Amino acid sequence: MDDPQTRPVSDPEREGLPGTADDDSSAYDDVDSARIADGPDPAALPADRPMASLDYGTTPAEARTPEPLDDRLDREEPDVTPDTGAANGSPDDDPGSTGITAAEQLPATDDPTELPADELVDSDESSSGADDGSAGRLLRPDEGAHPDEEGTEVAADTGASGGGLSAEEAAMHLDE
């Protein structure tokens, strides 16, 4: 009979978690880690879904003939621009579009507390320590440990964490 004290309470490997932590993970803001070898722009990891390169041309018969144009066009997705939100960049192509750019849709107010929280951007580059316009790790004043009692989101740029930026951190940029 198994002794209840020798049985693990949970089995992280059965749940898909690694048995040990990554060598580059740290609870501290140290830049000197194994992740620094990846550089500021580490290579992207492959996706968990089939790649488009496997859609056509993988068999010898397909390799001899070009892909039909109709098949290629079926996979195409229209470009959406941030200014109009319309496909292919033209407001005339979108029947619901008014032709007004995103900047013109912002309310005209000087009081930042009247704007939605997602439109507030701190453009003080001296706090980020970055000259290239990139933002580092954002951290709430209470470090996210307590319930949010403020009406707006407030965070400070704490710089690089672990030497390299995660995908989410790399997507952040300062907007003026």
Image: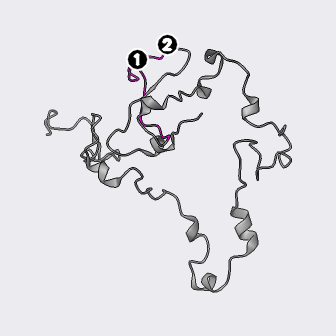
Q: Quadrant of residue 60?
A: bottom right
Determine whether, in the image, residue 57 is placed left or right of residue 158.
right
Magenta part of the protein: which range?
133-148
Determine whether, in the image, residue 75 is placed left or right of residue 126.
right
What is the quadrant of the N terminus in the image?
top left
**Residues under numbered marks 2 and 1 in contact, where contact means CB atoms less than 8 Å apart:** yes
Q: Position of residue 13 (x, y in %)?
A: 29, 47
- Circle 2: residue type: Glu
What is the quadrant of the C terminus in the image?
top right
Determine whether, in the image, residue 54 is placed left or right of residue 75.
left
Confirm whether the magenta stretch covers residue 142: yes
* Mark 2 and mark 1: Cα distance apart in space: 9 Å
Q: Position of residue 74 (x, y in %)?
A: 73, 63
For disc 2, the marked residue is: 149
Q: Quadrant of residue 8?
A: top left
Confirm whether the magenta stretch covers residue 102: no
